[in-house]
Amino acid sequence: MDGEAEDLVLPLFSAAVAGQDLPRKMEGHSPPLESIPPIRHRSTLGVVEITRGCGRGCQFCSVALRRGKSLPLSHILENVRTQVAEGADTILLTTEDLFLYQQGPHFQTNVPAIERLFDSVAAVNGVRYVGLTHGTIAPAVLDPGMIEELSPVAVGISVNQHEASTHPEHRYAVMFVGLETGSVRLFKQFMKGKAYPFRPEQWPDVVLKGMEILNRRNWFPMCTFILGLPGETPQDTRESLDLLFALKDAKSCVIPTLFVPLEDTRLESRKSARVAELTDLQWEFFFTCWRYNLDFFRNSRSVQWRFNLRVPIYYYLLGRRLFGSVMKYPLLRLAHFPEWFLRRKLYLDFSGRTAPRCVAPEQVAVPEHRQRPELPILGA
Ligand code: SF4
């Protein structure tokens, strides 16, 4: 079953139970909102769906061309109450993009609607924590005040805590944000709608400014990047590394993923990225991400030193046989080898002698032809 299932899944299950022949594959299409039934029982992680689809058009994404739609607030609250009635105290608001909820034309964020949603969910008797799944970064850059307005619920009753948070209880909001690449060329080719209303050329600025705005309000995003997009050149990987370097002190988790050509996307016929074929620069990207994550989330120095010692042992016993010497120096950076040594072997220089090539700008201006009276020209 590929796509949305409501219109097809009941007859399919009935046919299976009756022992009838089943089609090998079925395509589900977007059902009318009225035919999406409320849930009957508590779901894993307290998942409650708030939107479907997206429409930003990224070529690698299977929901890219499904127009975004929002479930009615009454439906969402009914599902929250069902979760709570069976013991859930945490509700995970599930969406491809939080900022699409009840959006206006041209991806215009409807902040009052999201606030109403947050407040209504938080007010349901029995809800202690609220979590978020995905969101795009451009709306935060376009309207930084929005992040502040949403923080009392997104941060204030988040289940996550980290000492780097300035919240009185050190809470922070998590949201998965697809950053995908630092290469403007690849961004323009495969996912330019993600930056809208900003231009694709502004993507590195949007990412850095967005991270600054989110971090300031204790939103620590989980950022995904894609390695091995079709046609990725060493220069593209270097540009992603430049962006990653500029995110070095960000409060976030950076997740490197490998390109997978999903069915029913514009890139479905392209070749998957394979871990055995990663280049030295791609390995550097991969392990730099995990170095950041370990440094930010690990809270015990003794665990760190034990880990650091084991990494070279892993490399000589197994890693180099599986993946070759191309992973060696990037892997040693994960193990905190001295930078005076690694800076001669790797692209990024962590010794402090080299300034990042990208820096967060003071402002990211919306191109004039995309400005609307209701959209502010962005400030810090
Ligand atoms: S913004 Fe995210 S959900 Fe939307 S099309 Fe792009 S990758 Fe898919």
Image (cartoon, helix red, strand yellow):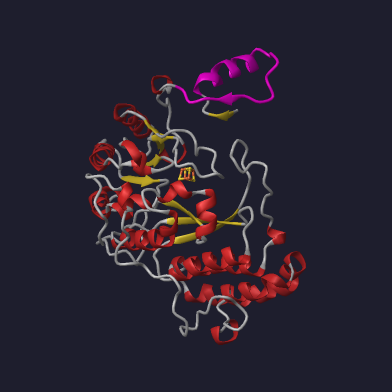
Q: Residue furthest bottom?
A: 340
Q: Residue furthest front?
A: 369
Q: Where residue 117 appears, x then y in whole percent? A: 28, 37
In the picture, measured across the screen, residue 373 lies left or right of residue 243, that is left
Q: Residue at x 62, y 72 (%)?
A: 331
Q: Nearer the viewer, residue 146 or 195?
A: 195
Q: Quadrant of residue 362?
A: bottom left
**Residue 207 visible in rendering:** yes
Q: Nearer the viewer, residue 354 or 85?
A: 354
Q: Residue at x 50, y 49 (%)?
A: 191
In the picture, measured across the screen, residue 195 lies left or right of residue 272, that is left
Q: Quadrant of residue 91?
A: top left
Q: Where residue 369 appears, x then y in whole percent? A: 32, 48
Q: Where residue 190 appears, x then y in whole percent? A: 54, 49
Q: Nearer the viewer, residue 81 or 379?
A: 379
Q: How many marks?
A: 0
302 w.r.t. 3: above or below = below
Q: Where residue 207 appears, x then y in whole percent? A: 40, 59
Q: Residue furthest right?
A: 321
31 w.r.t. 133: above or below = above
Can you say which quadrant of the picture contains the N terminus? top right
Can you say which quadrant of the picture contains the C terminus? bottom left
The verdict on residue 11 being magenta is yes
236 w.r.t. 16: above or below = below
Q: Residue at x 61, y 77 (%)?
A: 309
Which stretch is magenta?
6-31
The verdict on residue 219 being magenta is no
In the picture, measured across the screen, residue 31 lies left or right of residue 173, that is right
**Residue 89 visible in rendering:** no
